[in-house]
Amino acid sequence: MLGPDAVDPNAVTGFVNDDLPFDDSEEAETEREQAQAEWIMTGFPRCEPAFPVAKDESRTVDERFAIVEPNEVKTKTQPSTGRKEVWTYTAAVLVAGLRYTFAEATAEGLWLQVSALLLQLGVLSGARWLLVLGNGAAWIRRWFESLGICLKAMILYWWHLRKRCYEQMSSAGGPKDLRRAFEKELLRQLWEGKVNAAIELLKGALEWVRNPAVVEELIAYLEKRRAYIPDYQQW
């Protein structure tokens, strides 16, 4: 009920990355700071969004919920290791006034730790609802979809979704004024959870962008995550 077992617990599985590389430019950092100042859209339907808290205050989750925030971190290695990079899988679990943090070399190892905690927190028995917040990467989607519980939901971070759209459309090229107006309408549709309408907009953009392949990548990105793109203004 808490996800499939690894065939070989000691095996290191390959990483399938369907996200763009992290953008550490000054412009991206400014956008991250602006996003952090906004409400954090969390919860289930009819739940209020969470306000940001001061740096010296801890986030508090409603007693009825357990929030899991998984992520992956890529680290460049030293030449002597014979490897180009190392992937680390991480997760923060928030419940009531407590926060648990995990880090593992494999996704399977991470989910084993997280699942053991969720069992203790009463998620399996229905005492708490599970909310997963993240970037919707394939390894996160596979785990979430395998869970044998009913009181669960997953939401794609709005900041991550917005950033992905901006980066993809910038790479696609085309007249700047037209592209800016298009981005605004695209994000409006996604903010309201209208994924089909957003995809139709992107299909229309294939006719005027300089690099249609990038737009097709964005369409595929939305298709994979459509189940986790809610009407953000209602959440």
Image (spheres, rainbow, N blue to C red):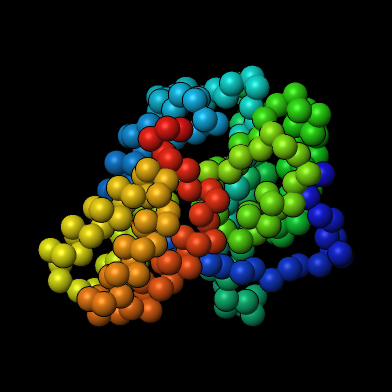
Q: Where is residue 112 drawn, in percent x and y?
A: 79, 48
Of 135 and 44, the residue lying toward us? 44
Left or right: where does residue 2 sit relative to residue 57?
right
Of 54 and 216, the residue lying toward us? 216
Q: Quadrant of the N terminus?
A: top right
Residue at 50% across, 62% down: 223
Question: Which residue in the rendered view is the most extreme toward the right?
Answer: 8
Task: Choose top left, top right, bottom left or bottom right for residue 80.
Answer: bottom right
Residue at 42% across, 57% down: 196
Task: Choose top left, top right, bottom left or bottom right for residue 212.
Answer: bottom left
Q: Where is residue 156 drawn, in percent x and y?
A: 50, 48
Task: Choose top left, top right, bottom left or bottom right for residue 73.
Answer: bottom right
Q: Where is residue 37 drawn, in percent x and y?
A: 33, 34
User: Does the image show residue 113?
Assistant: no
Residue at 56% across, 67% down: 17
Left or right: where does residue 129 sit relative to residue 124?
left
